[in-house]
Amino acid sequence: MEKTITNLELQKKNANRLNVYLDHEFAFGVSRFVGTRLKQGEKLDESSITQLLEKDTREKAFQKALKYLNYRPRSVHEVKQKMGELGFGESVIDDVVNELVTKNYLNDRDFAENRISSRVRSKPRSRKMIRFELLKKHIPEDIIQEAIEAAPNDDELALCLGKKYLRRFAHIEEREFVKKITGVLARRAFSFSVIKTVLKKLIIIREEST
């Protein structure tokens, strides 16, 4: 059964959405983007209405995903998980994510490289721990491996982290210094051999600076 569009008006609380009236009664709301071609006097059947509402749901999901990405970089898995939490169906989520990937708004390789760069710069930790963090984000193994191979090795990462604590531990005796630095490095999953090597370098740097 067809119905006629008798009025189209912008919503008062959201100018990006359009109220659609059929046969002089409010029928549904859609985004302006989805309803851009609707005209008064146009006739809609049930199939056309269903398609409009499906497009509107898809547009809502796309805008929600963009907003989620606006806060910080996300992995593909994170976006899918968030969209599921917001109540969107699997087919809508897959469609939106595919578009985001195609437009390069979402890129697991860039995500992995940026995450490693951030860790190296501000919060150094072992490659093992970095790998674990990326696996938790469901980054594909081949992408993780490639990104980690381009990062500094564990000796460099451990030394970088240790240097951040030199000033804080500058006035304690060497035995206590070794104990504290060992704890810091161990909590970042550096191996004993790496810790041993880096401690020797840090002790020399410490002695030279006093």
Image (cartoon, helix red, strand yellow):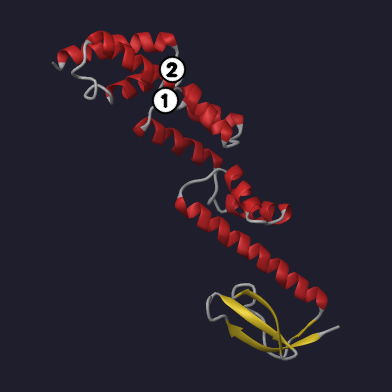
Q: Amino acid at mark 2?
A: Phe
Percent position (x, y) of residue 157? 37, 22
Q: Can you say whether 85 is above or below 177 in the image? A: below
Give the CA distance from mark 2 to mark 1: 7 Å
Q: Quadrant of the C terminus?
A: top left
Tell me what residue is drawn at x 15 percent, y 17 percent: 209
Nearest to the observer: residue 5 or residue 98: 5
Asked if the residue under mark 1 is in contact with the one under mark 2, i.e. CB atoms within 8 Å, the reply is yes
Q: Is residue 147 left or right of residue 169?
A: right
Q: Residues within 10 Å of mark 1 (few under 14, many from 20)?
A: many
Q: Quadrant of residue 172?
A: top left
- Tell me if residue 86 comes above or below residue 111 in the rendering: below
Which label's residue is closer to the chain start, 2 or 1?
Answer: 1
In the figure, 63 relative to 45: above or below? above
Left or right: residue 124 versus residue 176 is right
**Numbered mark located on residue 190 in the image:** 2
Q: Which residue is mark 1?
A: 125
Which residue is painted at 17% across and 12% down in the image? 207
The image quadrant where one finds the N terminus is bottom right
- Looking at the image, residue 209 sits to the left or right of residue 93; the answer is left
> Is residue 76 shown to the viewer in this render?
yes
The residue drawn where x is 27% and y is 12% is 176
Note whether 87 is above or below 57 in the view shown. Answer: above
Kindly state the secondary structure of the residue where label 1 is placed. Answer: loop
Q: In the rendered structure, which amino acid carries the disc numbered 1?
A: Arg
Q: Is residue 48 left or right of residue 57?
A: right
Residue 201 appears in the figure: no
Residue 105 location in percent, x, y?
Answer: 53, 51
**Residue 139 screen position, x and y as percent:** 58, 35
